[in-house]
Image (cartoon, helix red, strand yellow):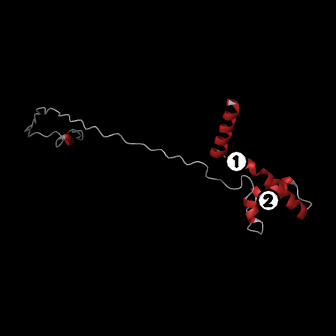
Amino acid sequence: MRRRTAILLLLIYIMGATELDQLLRFPLLIKHFVIHKSENPGITVAMFIKMHYIDRQLFDEDYLEDMQLPFKQADDHCLVLATVVPEPLATVYHETPLLPYEYNLFNNPYNPLLNSGNIFKPPQV
């Protein structure tokens, strides 16, 4: 009994959360192929699949039937909403100690950058 219940619940989950419920539409695919085969006896299964799944969709008289075929359109199976409650922000008050800082101002009248051109002199005879 437990095994049957587990299989049933697994099937319900798989059919609801995946695209495997499209396999339930497989008889429609066979029925639609038989209709096309009666209209055009030369059609093969490969041509039928190419016409309905690979080629561009035509808006013809059987468009609504074409859209009922399996894996023809994606269904929205499952909507997952993640609700995240943000944690309150913790405010940490941390006083940084003021360190004494010395400003050393040098009053140097000799600026080495101004006299750097004196090094490059042509040789004197």
Label 2 close to label 1 by CB (< 8 Å): no
Q: Label 1 amino acid?
A: Asp
Q: Position of residue 91 (x, y in %)?
A: 25, 38
- What is the quadrant of residue 4 in the picture? top right
Q: In the image, which is nearer the foreground, mark 2 or mark 1?
A: 1
**Farthest top residue in view:** 2
Structural crowding at the residue carrying mark 2, measured as other residues with C-alpha within 10 Å and reported as few (<14), some (14–19) or many (≥20): few
Residue at 72 percent of width and 60 percent of height: 67
Task: State the quadrant of the N terminus.
Answer: top right
Q: Nearer the viewer, residue 28 or 61?
A: 28
Q: Is residue 63 above or below residue 100?
A: below
Q: Is residue 116 left or right of residue 58?
A: left
**SS of the residue under disc 1:** helix
Task: State the quadrant of the C terminus.
Answer: top left
**SS of the residue under disc 2:** helix
Residue at 70 percent of width and 45 percent of height: 20
Q: Tell me, for residue 45, which label it has, or none.
A: none
How far is the residue under mark 2 from the one under mark 1?
23 Å
Q: Position of residue 57 (x, y in %)?
A: 73, 62
Q: Tell me, for residue 51, which label it has, or none.
A: 2
Q: Nearer the viewer, residue 101 or 90?
A: 90
Q: Position of residue 120 (x, y in %)?
A: 24, 40
Q: Position of residue 23 (x, y in %)?
A: 74, 47
Structural crowding at the residue carrying mark 1, measured as other residues with C-alpha within 10 Å and reported as few (<14), some (14–19) or many (≥20): some
**Farthest right residue in view:** 41
Q: Nearer the viewer, residue 56 or 76?
A: 76
- What is the quadrant of residue 3 in the picture? top right
Q: Label 2 amino acid?
A: Met
User: Which residue does the numbered mark 1 point to in the structure image?
Assistant: 21
Of callouts 2 and 1, which one flags the residue occurring earlier in the amino acid sequence? 1
